[in-house]
């Protein structure tokens, strides 16, 4: 089992940057594929970015491609989401997620098995 705790959210002006971090505890972290999702008020939880167990493959939602970067450090049991050129429409609660399918680099919320509690990101115009 894996426990996930997100941090790094906050309030930022449009055009600014934030770096989210997800700290994992438990065994075999390096065998899990990881992802970031987000959920805005009144909307479904949506996939943002995913990374395979080794970090060798990543995938991004079209809405964040070129602005966000997902990465992981298996030795530290950490996953990161660097968010640049933030827009008001990026405002949401951001969640870290882990999947047993170690080669997965994308998916729906139903494809991921463990979730963090979320961290709020608010981007003002």
Image (cartoon, rainbow, N blue to C red):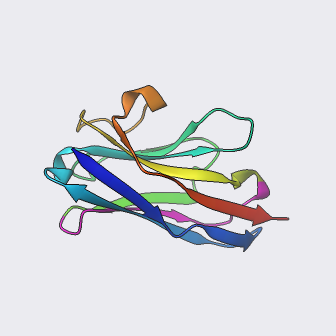
Is 7 in front, or is 62?
7
Q: In which quarter of the image is the C terminus?
A: bottom right
Q: Which residue is drawn at 71% across and 55% down?
A: 91
Question: Taking 121 as reference, is 73 left or right?
Answer: left
Count every numbered label the image shows and give the total: 0
Q: Nearer the viewer, residue 14 or 98?
A: 98
Farthest residue, direction right: 125
Residue 10 figure quarter: bottom right
Q: Position of residue 96 (x, y in %)?
A: 43, 50
Say left or right for 22 vs 13.
Answer: left
Q: Foreground: 66 or 17?
A: 17
Q: What stretch is highlighted in magenta?
A: 75-88
Q: In which quarter of the image is residue 105?
A: top left
Residue 17 picture quarter: bottom right
Q: Of all residues shown, which one is farthest toward the top? A: 110
Above or below, 66 against 110 in this view is: below
- In the figure, is residue 80 to the left or right of 14? left
Tell me: 27 left or right of 96.
Answer: left
What x and y, as percent, mark residue 39? 63, 43
Magenta span includes 97: no
Residue 51 is at least partly visible in this image: no
Q: Position of residue 48 (x, y in %)?
A: 53, 45
> Which residue is at the far left?
28
Q: Which residue is drawn at 58% across and 46% down?
A: 38
Q: In which quarter of the image is the N terminus?
A: top left
Q: Examine the rendered structure and indicate whether residue 33 appears above or below residue 21.
A: above
Where residue 27 appears, x then y in whole percent?
14, 52
Q: Tell me if residue 81 is in the magenta stretch.
A: yes
Is residue 79 among what the camera can see?
Answer: yes
């Amino acid at each position: 089992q894996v426990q996930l705790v997100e941090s790094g959210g906050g309030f930022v002006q449009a055009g600014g940057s934030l770096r989210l971090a997800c700290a994992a505890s438990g065994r075999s972290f390096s065998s899990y594929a990881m992802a970031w999702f987000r959920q805005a008020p009144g909307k479904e939880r949506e996939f943002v970015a995913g990374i395979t167990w080794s970090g060798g493959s990543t995938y991004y939602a079209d809405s964040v491609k070129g602005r966000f970067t997902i990465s992981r450090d298996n030795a530290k049991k950490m996953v990161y989401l660097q968010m640049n050129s933030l827009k008001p429409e990026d405002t949401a609660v951001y969640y870290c997620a882990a999947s047993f399918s170690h080669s997965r680099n994308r998916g729906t919320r139903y494809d991921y098995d463990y979730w963090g509690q979320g961290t709020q990101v608010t981007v003002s115009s």
